[in-house]
Amino acid sequence: MNEQELTPHYEELKRVLKDKVDDEQIMNELKKYVNEFHISPEAAKRGILRKFGVLEQTPFQSSSLVKKIGDLNGTEASVDMLVKAIYVEKKDITVKGSPKTIISGLIGDETGTASFTVWEGKQVEMEKGAVYWLKSAYAKTWNEKIQINIGARGSVEKADGMRVDVPDRSISMESSDVKIGRIAGGMGNVTVTGRIISAEERNVTVKGEPKTVYSGMIADDTGKIQYSAWNDFGLKEGETVCIKNAYIRSWKGIPQLNMGERCEVSRVDDTFGNDIADVVTTKKIGDIVRTGGGLDINVAGTVVDMRRGSGLIERCPECNRSIINGECQAHGRVEPVMDLRMKLTLDDGTGAISAIVNRELTERLTGVTLGMAQGLAKARGNMEPVERELAKSMLIRRLSVTGNVMSDDYGPMMIVRAAEVVKEDLTAEAKKLLDEVEASL
């Protein structure tokens, strides 16, 4: 099984193991049990939990329980539910570069409603108003709201002849007003007000049928986000709009605003000023780890590591990929173009983020030019001294970096477009530390 197919099982293990085992080790253990030992995912999960001594406390040892929505607490790993579909939408998305069909929307029973997602939705059909058994679903919480997921080991079965009455008062898509800079993946329905800073139409083919997708960028005074819609809302660059009942999906960990058939758009007065297109969202790294990536994010932190792959590298002249062992993955053996970059790890005390720094910024931050790096590599007979030279000038320095941040199971990563060294006021920092020490005595 590939990583995408293992993800639902990995998520279940991660919820149970929590801080006991790091995320990378969980995925590696799962791959080893399933792909090397050739045992089923269910047996693999039991084996991994037994290995780390927590099997007795987990729900994996029992079969699924039947629960109502109102009884869920967001930690259920396997639960069966009889529900009515209130709103259903089937859509094609891209997950880690691969196409995927999912079904999402709102379901309800006598005790309440909740959003849901069927992650393997290609062979599943659901319709508004019908009653279904959701088998082996798992529940999570986001912003204190229950979310129900049906992964690879779950199923959706139509419950013919069954009836579920959902109280009218509990049916709500709960669209909430939110600033763009605070939008995070998995938020559900939102209402945003912002200025359209770009708009375009593209003709695409979906399941053999020609369609038009309307997309662009919208910004307010806290940040910017990409939007897309299958319907033409007549959005034009420069106008300010209020968008109600949009929903959030993430691509490579970057939240995107999606405008579905329930979405409403109205034109409003612009109160944002002239420089909104250049707005940058400043965040703590811990917040990014918790809520996902975004566009034009700024963080400040200390360089605690320079990872392998930094320094002098060779690139393919055709596609700009880095060359490994003299060959490009796409174009084979080529005459390489030399380049310089840094792969840094920054820590601000709340979390850590990977940062990819291009040649121009590397030269400006370190004073080591591409020509100097090539000369050093030629003199020493290999390229490794260049990485060490860059590390000498960067480690333990405090940087402010800005760029787009992607996020996946291995953490957030920024493609840096702007960077500068943060000048420390040592006297002020020493006084602050002294005050903290004295206050703790």
Image: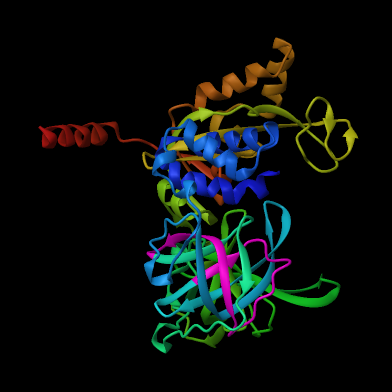
Q: Residue at x 51, y 49 (%)?
A: 12
Q: Position of residue 271 (x, y in %)?
A: 43, 78
Tell me if residue 277 is in the magenta stretch.
no
- Location of residue 136 by image quarter: bottom right
Query: In which image quadrant can residue 111 be found?
Result: bottom left
Q: Which residues, given as a range, are shown in magenta?
A: 115-144
Q: Would residue 138 be counted in the magenta stretch?
A: yes
Above/below status of 227 relative to 436: below
Q: Is residue 67 left or right of residue 344?
A: left
**Label tally:** 0
The answer to which of 97 and 123 lies nearer the viewer is 123
Expressed as whole percent of the image width and height from the top left, the position of residue 335 reads: 88, 30
Position of residue 125 measured from the top left corner of the image (x, y, whole percent): 69, 74
Residue at the far left in the pictured view: 441
Residue at x 51% of width, y 39% of height = 23
Q: Is residue 389 above or below residue 283?
A: above
Its colouring scheme is: rainbow
Quadrant of the image occupied by residue 374: top right
- Relative to residue 290, is residue 340 drawn left or right? right
Q: Eyeballing the image, is 353 above or below 224? A: above
Q: Is residue 29 visible?
A: yes
In the figure, is residue 85 to the left or right of 425?
right
Q: In which quadrant of the rendered image does the N terminus lie?
A: top right
Q: Residue at x 64, y 56 (%)?
A: 152
Q: Does residue 328 lie above or below 59 as drawn?
A: above
